[in-house]
Amino acid sequence: METLKDKTLQELEELQNDSEAIDQLALESPEVQDLQLEREMALATNRSLAEQNLEFQGPLEISRSNLSDKYQELRKLVERCQEQKAKLEKFSSALQPGTLLDLLQVEGMKIEEESEAMAEKFLEGEVPLETFLENFSSMRMLSHLRRVRVEKLQEVVRKPRASQELAGDPYGFPPPPGPAWPGY
């Protein structure tokens, strides 16, 4: 308000009654002009940022849609993976040596009983000789194969137990020998 310093008392009183002149002085003051310039610059900056944001909106929406699709695909893959894991666990539990041994023993007993029943039917005359020879020999061969497999599998099942009983070595090696001379 440098311009008011130079005015006389009479000019100031006249100015006090002229509201348009006061408004004009206020608008022409450097402080108000600086504020007006800052305001215009802020508005221009905001407009520029808003335009940039609008330019990013399209790619952002496409990326958001792609991300949503990928997330759905991931969920399907996770579900499929969990299903496959459950199947694998089911099959791996069925393939444990102990489980296999039990199943093989049961099947061995079944074929043994079937071959015995076939022999009884032959002895009672219910089955002709040719049918008996064909069926009985294949049943007995299968029975013997299963018995051999049961024995081999029993050895496999016993082996890990025996190696665990060794000195706690996970690889089944025997414990190292003690010192040759006590006290050294």
Image: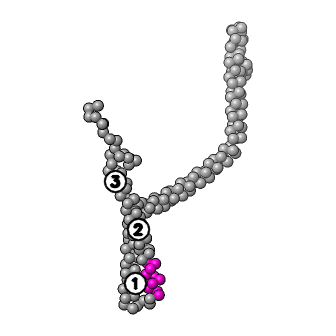
Q: How far is mark 1 from mark 3, CA to CA? A: 41 Å
Kind of residue indicated by mark 3: Ala
Task: Provide the residue span drawn in magenta.
Answer: 130-139
Q: Is residue 59 above or below residue 120?
A: above
**C-alpha span from label 3 to label 2:** 21 Å
* Quadrant of res 125: bottom left
Taking the view exactly as shown, the residue that stands out farthest to the bottom is 125
Where is 177 relative to 83, above or below? Answer: above
Instruction: Look at the image and say whether residue 133 sits in the magenta stretch.
Output: yes
- The numbered mark at residue 172 is none
Residue located 68% across and 33% down the image:
46
The residue that label 1 is drawn on is 118
Checking the image for residue 148, the label placed there is 2
Q: Which circle's residue, 3 or 2, is located before the other in the chain?
A: 2
Where's the C terminus, which quadrant?
top left
**In front of the other: label 3 or label 2?**
2
* CA neighbours of label 2 inside 10 A, class few (<14), some (14 to 19), many (20+): few
Residue 138 picture location, percent across and down? 46, 78
Q: Is residue 155 magenta?
A: no
Report which residue position mark 3 lands on. Answer: 162
Q: Amino acid at mark 2?
A: Val
Q: Quadrant of the N terminus?
A: top right
